[in-house]
Every structure is written in C-alpha cells, then in structure tokens.
Image (cartoon, rainbow, N blue to C red):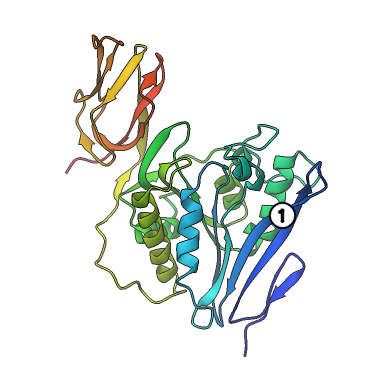
Amino acid sequence: MARESFAIGTVRIRPGTIRNLELPITRLVTGADVSLPVRVVHGREDGPTIWVSAAIHGDEVVGVEVIRQVLATLDPKTFRGTLVAVPIVNVLGFMTGDRYLPDRRDLNRSFPGSARGSLAARIAHLFMVEVVAKCEVGLDLHTGSDRRSNLPQIRADLDDPLTRELAEAFAAPVMLHAKIRDGSLRHAARERGAKVLLYEAGEALRLDNYAIDAGVAGVRRVLAALGMTDPVDEPAPGPSVESRTSGWVRARSTGIFHLEVGLGQRVNEGERLGALLDSFGKTLRIVRASWTGIVVGRTEQPLVNSGDALVHIAEVNQD
C-alpha cells in the first residue's frame, strides 16, 4: 500500500516528492507578508518523520548551509520517511543579521508559544503546531553567540537511550549532557515527546567550513541511523568525547586578551590559556584553566572587561 500524503499548512505532499512551501507568520508595516520557508522531503517508503531547523537566532548562518548541503543529497524516491527542513526559523532576525526578533525577544526562550501572544510567541506556536507536532525527532542547529566560536558539539539528554544513540551516531567531537532551558525549542519539543539533538558549532555571521562539514556529516549519519537513508560511504568517525559538566573561565581583569588555546584542545587545571595585557603590552594577568577538560568554546573578542567569558571548558573523564 502506498504511503499517505503528508499534510502541512494548507498543502498535502505526495510520497516520493519534494515540496517547498511557506507558512504565514505576519505582515510588515509596509504590507508585505512574512512567511516561514519550509522544504519537505516525503519519501516513497515508510520511515520516521523528523525535522531539521536552523537560524532560530537570526545571526546563526552555519546551520542554513548545513541544511542546504544535506537536502542536495536526498532523493525522495529512495528516501524512507519524511524530513521537514526549516533553514531559517527567525526570518525577521535573519533579514537584518540580528540574533533576536525586532521586539528584542529571544525566540529560543519563547516556546511553546501562543497563537495570540507576542510575535516571538506566535512564531514558536506556529513551529510547534506545523513542525514539531508532526515529528518524532528533531535536529536544531546553532552557532556560538556574542563573538564566540564553538567546537562542533551535540548537546542533548544523554540519559535518554534513543537520544544518546542518535548523539553517538552524529559523532561530533564532543557530546555534552546539557540542562534544558525553559522556553527553548528543545524543552518544548521534549514535552511533546520528541527526541532532540542540539548542534553547536562555529561563530555567528560566519560560514565556518569546519562547522559546516561536521554538521553535514553528522546530520547524514543520523538519517542513516534512523534508516531513512543508506549508510554514508566515509571513514568511520571517532567516538564523541562525553562531558556532563562545563563552564566558562572568566576574565579577572579588564584588558586586551591574547588567546593561546584552540577549539578541541585538551587542557589541564592550572594550564595557561592566555594573558590579559594593557595597551603598552604590560601583562595584567595570566589566564589559567580552572579545571581539566577540552576547549569547546572561546571568545573571539580581544577587548574584554572583568567578568567576561573567555574560554569554555567541558570536563571529561580521564583515561
């Protein structure tokens, strides 16, 4: 028996086809309509229904390119299941390169939203009703914020067996057991029963190739693990390093920060991470690791104030 068509918005998509559509969001003061762009790959054969989304923060562009490259590899005639791709969730922020919406709300603190709430609440509600409610698994793609860069990493509930299995399949360099924040897409989707992986990599407003390549490979490995595609023909990736605790080393003085460690570097407690200098080159303070672990994030801003986050270290089990 042939698969049923897939309903989303006001359209139905036949099995074995790809369809682009727009879900209406709002109208600008100019009278122009703003819509959420969606592409659905509705496979000819049965399988899971999952979503992959990016740019919930409008300045995070890496995930948009990841989704573009993944979609270019999919054939709906051999695809098993259904993929709902939403490359730009925060359309209004993306238009201006802004992390937030025009009302300064953080969309990723506005879920599950409300049909009659703020603009952020309405976008969140639309996404929950038209995307999350139809899916069993979600991949939410992010980058670092506030002039920070992130090592490719998966953040997820590693105590849930299926979520952990998918995180291991993604095979990012690090998988972090991350607390769920109220109002986030991950929290709201989990309350609806979906399994969610949050991918972090790269820097805002930059197409970092290392972040894109790891994201594309990871998403394709998850699709294969779910049986939606054939396994990717590539060398087997190394296992992800697991971490259950992480934190930022912060500046204890104001100055010009000379960073001396890279993403993915392992550091020991007390190890030198860099130095804070004044404008004449006088060393104001040596910055050292507060604990042993792996560098999963770092500031890209050399001008820092006392208290600013400098280096994000994830604690890992020592062999």
Left or right of 268, for residue 67: right
Residue 209 against residue 78 in the figure, above or below = above
Quadrant that contains the C terminus = top left
Q: Quadrant of residue 100?
A: top right
Regarding mark 1 in the picture, which secondary structure is present there?
Answer: strand
- 144 and 157: which is toward the camera: 144
Q: Position of residue 17 (x, y in %)?
A: 60, 79
Pinpoint residue 212: horizontal percent, then vertical percent.
Answer: 40, 54
The answer to whether residue 6 is visible is yes
Task: List x then y, in percent, for residue 256.
Answer: 33, 17
Residue visible at 27% across and 23% down in the picture: 258
Residue at figure coordinates x 24%, y 57% from the top left: 238
For this view, does 296 lie left or right of residue 67?
A: left
The amino acid type, in three-letter code, at marker 1 is Ser
Compared to residue 47, the image places residue 22 above or below, namely above
Asked if residue 271 is positioned above or below residue 235 in the image, the reply reads above
